[in-house]
Structure formats: structure tokens, C-alpha cells
Amino acid sequence: MLKSTKIAIALGGNLGNPEENFRIAAQKLIDGGCEELQTSRIYRSAAVDCVANTPDFCNAALCGKWKGSALELLHLCQRIEREAGRPAEHSQREARTLDLDIILFGDEVCDTPELTLPHPRAQNRRFVLEPLSELIPDDRFPDTGMKIAECLRKSSPKI
């Protein structure tokens, strides 16, 4: 029997209907094997590190459990993004229908060409930390040991 790993996923989008895209993505994650999924409320934020005139983003977080590997979860997230209309090859600086980023995968720390855990910029980005703090404020980033709520308090309101 496979061990369940606690996961945290950030959702973002600023094209189409992000709220509906988030709802559909959450259901597809459940259908794909995510368990005990909890969803934060939706936050709005200015686009960060994007091309000029990129619309504001909607952001949220999902937390739950996963019985597969981190790469299997990544591939599921990528498939869901493509099904929502995001091209497989895309710039991180452009508007998008759906972005699913694995922020935490248990206590796993890795840095490979395909996946970096925890997500490399999550600890500094308010638009990731706010929704996560709503669900798991006392969980820690395994690479720094900092709590999500602590990172949120230290983050700039502009990132």
C-alpha cells in the first residue's frame, strides 16, 4: 500500500473564468487521486514578473494528500493545465487560463530539471503565501524550516 504524502498546490489564472477553472482543476485532481482536498478562498493580485499590461491574477491554494510520486502529481497538474487551454510550451511571463504549481510535497526537497521542491519562489510570494496560510499556516518549508505564516508576515505586499 502506498503512503499518502501531504501536498500543497497553488492555483493561478487570469484568462477566461479563473474561478470556474479552479473548480474544475480541483475536481480533476480528486478524480486523478488527490484525497482530503481543501480549497482556500480566491485572492486577486497584480501580475508579478509578467509582460506589460498583463491582467490581474486570481490565486488560490489546495491542500490534501497524494499517494503517488511528486513527478506523477506534476504530470497530472500539467495535463490539467493543458486541458484548461494552457499550451504545453509557454512563457511564465504571459497571461494564462490556469497555472498549477506544486508548492510542498511532504518534506521532500529536490532540484531537478523537471521539478524543484519546495517551489523555489513560494516563500517570497504573497500571492502564494496568503491562500496557503489560510489552510496550513503552521506547516513549514522543509528547506528553510520557516512556517508559512511566518513567511507571509515577512513578505512584501507587492510580490
Image (tube, helix red, strand yellow):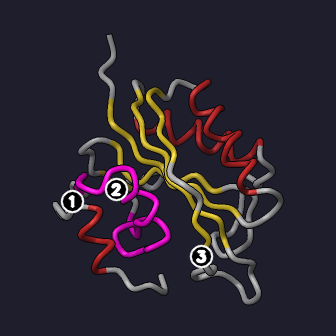
Q: Secondary structure at mark 1?
A: loop
Q: Is residue 139 magenta?
A: yes
Circles 2, 3 touching at the beta carbon (< 8 Å): no
The residue segment tinted magenta is 120-140
Residue occupying the point 55% across, 55% down: 41
Residue 144: x and y in percent read: 19, 64
Amino acid marked by disc 1? Asp
Q: Secondary structure at mark 2?
A: loop
Circles 1, 3 touching at the beta carbon (< 8 Å): no
Which residue in the structure is indicated by mark 1? 143
In this rendering, position of residue 123 left or right of residue 11 = left
Report crowding for label 1: few under 14, some 14 to 19, many 20 or more residues within 10 A (C-alpha): few
Report crowding for label 2: few under 14, some 14 to 19, many 20 or more residues within 10 A (C-alpha): many
Q: Nearer the viewer, mark 2 or mark 3?
A: 3
Number of the label disc, if any, that sits on residue 22 = none
Residue 148: x and y in percent read: 29, 62
Residue 26: x and y in percent read: 61, 38
Q: Is residue 8 above or below residue 11?
A: above
Q: Quadrant of residue 137?
A: bottom left
Residue 9: x and y in percent read: 48, 49
Residue occupying the point 66% across, 48% down: 22
Residue occupying the point 65% across, 32% down: 28
